Amino acid sequence: MTESMRPSPDKAIDVALAEYKALRDEIVGCFTKQGAVLGLGLAAIGVIFTAAAKDTGNRQLLVVVPPLALVVSALHTAEWARFTRIGQYIRCELWPYLRKQTGYDRSWQLWILERMRRRNPIQRFFSEGFIVPILFAAIALGALIWRGVEYLNVAWIILEVVFVVFSILVPAFTWIGMRGQIPTMPDMWTTERLERFLEDLESAAVPHAEPGEPLLADAVRAELARRRSEQP
């Protein structure tokens, strides 16, 4: 791009802010879709359990609960992965550009990131929404046990169990696949990206750690030092 074609700094900032707003709106949309999927899934399962529990009900209706649980789990996880990627782009690409152009040193994204590092694995498990797939897998397993196996052949029973297992495996493998994109694990990043991320951390107004607890920047410095010490 030639100099004459480059947008003015003010225009570039306006475009970046517009992109930021659009991405934030998209994140809100992801949360809305997650809520809708969760609500519809629970409503459908509630109707099925109610119908099966009646005196004249047919417990074979419960056969649809495990595949329904898998669908809800997959859709819920897809939205989680989507807004996580958007947050990564804002934190690692868009915000550093705005900080460089404006000198504004506050960052909600880094503030949230630093607070997340202080949570123990159980707190992170619940805060990142992984309880939802576990919940639906448990409901599916309960439906499978309650219905019984006397009306099903072996192949169908195995298929039902597969639905229950994949209700948990889908989010698990999604999280594993995104590990390299999560900055709380700096060992997965390139050295150049780590150095750039450290600059952002050092210039941002992020909260201080509790006594005896290292900041995220300290973890990044330690990882960079380890890599430099291993260089020939």
Image (cartoon, rainbow, N blue to C red):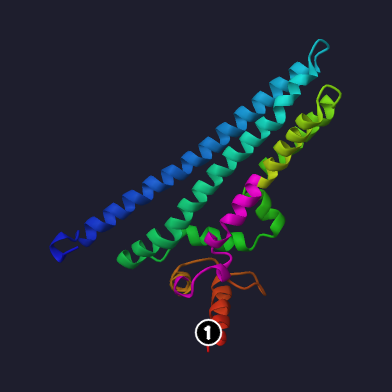
Q: In which quadrant of the rendered view does residue 122 lie?
A: bottom right
Q: Is residue 190 magenta?
A: yes
Q: Is residue 226 magenta?
A: no
- Which portion, as a residue range, is magenta? 170-193
Q: Residue at 55% x, 46% y: name it.
A: 80
Q: Provide the major secondary structure of the magenta segment.
A: helix
In the visual, does 167 lie left or right of 114?
right
Number of numbered labels in the structure image: 1
Q: In which quadrant of the rendered view does residue 140 lie?
A: top right
In the visual, does 46 lie left or right of 6?
right
In the picture as drawn, the residue positioned furthest to the top comes out as 56
Residue 206 screen position, x and y as percent? 51, 66
In the visual, does 80 lie left or right of 161?
left
In-front residue for pair 114/219: 219
In-front residue for pair 199/138: 138
Residue 27 screen position, x and y as percent? 47, 45
Q: Residue at 53% x, 42% y: name it.
A: 79
**In the rendered image, the vertical position of residue 191 relative to residue 78, given as above or below:** below
Q: In which quadrant of the rendered view does residue 118 lie?
A: bottom right
**In the rendered image, the vertical position of residue 105 relative to residue 46, given as above or below:** below
